[in-house]
Image (spheres, grey):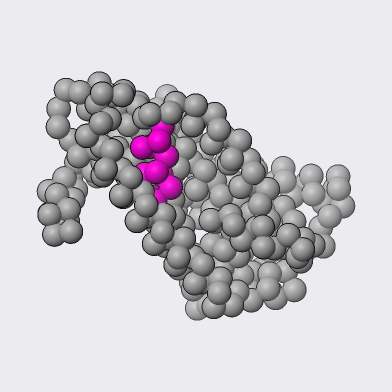
């Protein structure tokens, strides 16, 4: 453990440089650049709010726009972070073959750069909360604990996927289907109380409880989001520990074989 920490500290500057590179690369040749991290969530919120209110007449939730945006942001981070991490080893095959760099740097830089963009995308969420006069108080910031859980869960799953993808390239196609399933299991567009019979199934979604906690403290409206009990927090802790532990174990066990399979 001590050796791993020393190795991480030794290469922390390289990690930061790769994070900055990933952010610049994402918005390269874009006129609006990083502003898209603010504009995109707003546009998605407007579309989804319109579809589920004007078209399907399903707006029975107070501050429906905030309800959708708060969950959509978390899902988008999880989807992007794990998807980019999954491809990171294969995409950097030439660099891995030429010089020694700790291989965990590649998926971790993708996750960290996506997390920074994710934090920037909170600007429109705050703006929408102010527009709809959603109260922002000390309890609102308790929702940040959900982001910590989400980061560790995404990191663990990202490490698992980046390992599997080296040996099984079809994983990219399978995971795109799985992400769609996770999206519909995250209760982004509908109230959980409408599908209480499926609650046990929804809880199998590793980010469902993170969204539940975050959304509750953002809205602070029990009629829209029920109060998360201790079991919700416990599941988040378990998911975080299990996925990070499994991800680190699989990645470390197989990283020396990467060079022969990329």
Q: What segment carries the magenta color?
A: 155-165
Asked if one can make out residue 116 in the rendered structure from this viewpoint, the answer is no
Corner quadrant of residue 100: top left
- Picture residue at 51% right of the left edge, 39% below the top: 36
- Picture residue at 26% right of the left edge, 37% below the top: 255
Which image quarter is the C terminus in? top left
**Residue 14 location, x and y as percent?**
19, 41
Classify 135 as above or below 67.
Answer: below
Q: Is residue 228 left or right of residue 82?
A: right
Magenta portion: prevailing SS class? helix
Q: Nearer the viewer, residue 129 or 61?
A: 61
Q: Is residue 19 left or right of residue 164?
A: left
Asked if one can make out residue 233 in the rendered structure from this viewpoint, the answer is yes
Which image quarter is the N terminus in? bottom left
**Residue 131 location, x and y as percent?**
65, 61
Classify 71 as above or below 18.
Answer: below
**Residue 3 location, x and y as percent?**
12, 54
**Residue 91 location, x and y as percent?**
35, 26
Q: Nearer the viewer, residue 142 or 226?
A: 226
């Amino acid at each position: 453990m001590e050796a791993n920490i020393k190795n991480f500290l030794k290469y922390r500057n390289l990690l930061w440089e790769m994070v900055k590179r990933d952010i610049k690369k994402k918005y390269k040749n874009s006129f609006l650049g990083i502003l898209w991290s603010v504009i995109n969530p707003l546009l998605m919120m407007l579309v989804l709010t319109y579809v589920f209110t004007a078209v399907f007449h399903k707006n029975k939730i107070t501050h429906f726009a905030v309800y959708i945006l708060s969950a959509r942001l978390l899902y988008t981070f999880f989807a992007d972070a794990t998807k980019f991490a999954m491809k990171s080893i294969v995409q950097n095959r030439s660099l891995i073959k030429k010089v020694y760099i700790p291989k965990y740097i590649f998926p971790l830089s993708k996750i960290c750069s996506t997390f920074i963009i994710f934090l920037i995308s909170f600007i429109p969420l705050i703006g929408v909360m102010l527009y709809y006069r959603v109260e922002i108080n000390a309890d609102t910031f308790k929702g940040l604990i959900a982001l910590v859980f989400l980061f560790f869960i995404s990191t663990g799953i990202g490490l698992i996927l980046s390992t599997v993808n080296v040996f099984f390239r079809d994983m990219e196609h399978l995971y795109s289907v799985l992400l769609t399933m996770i999206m519909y299991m995250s209760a982004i567009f509908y109230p959980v109380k409408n599908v209480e019979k499926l609650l046990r199934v929804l809880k199998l979604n590793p980010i469902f409880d993170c969204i539940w906690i975050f959304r509750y403290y953002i809205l602070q409206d029990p009629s829209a989001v029920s109060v998360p009990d201790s079991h919700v927090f416990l599941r988040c802790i378990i998911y975080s520990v299990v996925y990070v532990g499994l991800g680190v174990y699989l990645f470390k066990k197989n990283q020396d074989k990467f060079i022969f399979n990329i």
